[in-house]
Image (cartoon, rainbow, N blue to C red):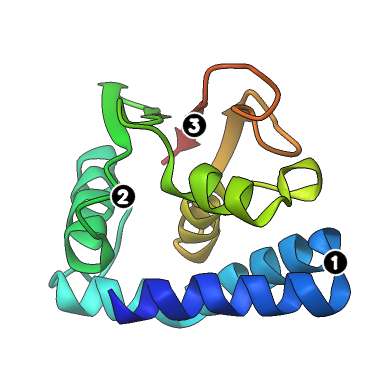
Amino acid sequence: MGWMTHDGSWFSSVLQKYGAKAASDLNRQAILAMSAFEVPRLKKALGMEEVTAYEQLREFIEGGFDLIGADFMQFKRIYPGADIIRWEEPDNGCFAYKGIKRLGALDDYDCGIFYRVEAWLKGLGIKYTVTPEVHGCLRHQGKPCFREYKVEL
């Protein structure tokens, strides 16, 4: 998991030098910038030219996380209808929450896990609404950690 070690070390370094808010903001900026490269590369690796239907989106998300995910990143992905994607924290807890908590930065952390999903949707040109719309970390706020995306395809 060399890239995850780098990601955590990068966040920690920015946190130490510029503070938790800057580290969180820059992390989200990097996620959005990365998606401009990641989305086309994943489409190519998955043999997909376009993602214009719900089933294609499901294949993209599942295939994408099979390619880039790690065993400890096991967020539950549920597809309950023709336009809904629900993501839930895994039973063993969120790896990002655990890492940011160790760094003592939860008060100023905006979730990067769900933001990556949103960056993929933006990169695919898919309009969506998200419930709940969250700022910060739901788990840190003592609430269940999930997002439900209603997509327009």
Q: Nearer the viewer, mark 2 or mark 1?
A: 1
Q: Amino acid at mark 1?
A: Gly
Query: What element does badge 1 sit on?
Result: loop
* Label located before the other in sequence (3 or 2): 2
Q: Nearer the viewer, residue 98 or 43?
A: 98
Which residue matches tag 1? 19
User: Residue 83: which disc?
Assistant: none
Which residue matches tag 3? 149
Q: Amino acid at mark 2?
A: Met
Q: Residue at x 41, y 41 (%)?
A: 153
Q: Residue at x 53, y 17 (%)?
A: 144
Q: Nearer the viewer, mark 3 or mark 1?
A: 1
For the N terminus, the quadrant is bottom left
Q: Are marks 3 and 2 in contact (CB under 8 Å)?
A: no
Determine crowd level at label 2: few under 14, some 14-19, many 20+ residues with C-alpha closer than 10 A. Answer: some
Question: In the picture, residue 80 is in which quadrant?
Answer: top left
Q: Amino acid at mark 3?
A: Tyr
| Spatial separation of the CA atoms under disc 2 and disc 1 | 26 Å
Q: Nearer the viewer, residue 19 or 24?
A: 19
**Whether residue 117 is situated above or below residue 146 in the rendered picture:** below
Determine crowd level at label 3: few under 14, some 14-19, many 20+ residues with C-alpha closer than 10 A. Answer: many
Determine crowd level at label 1: few under 14, some 14-19, many 20+ residues with C-alpha closer than 10 A. Answer: some
One can see residue 107 in this view? yes
* Label located before the other in sequence (2 or 1): 1
**Whether residue 54 is situated above or below residue 7 in the rendered picture:** above
Which residue matches tag 2? 73
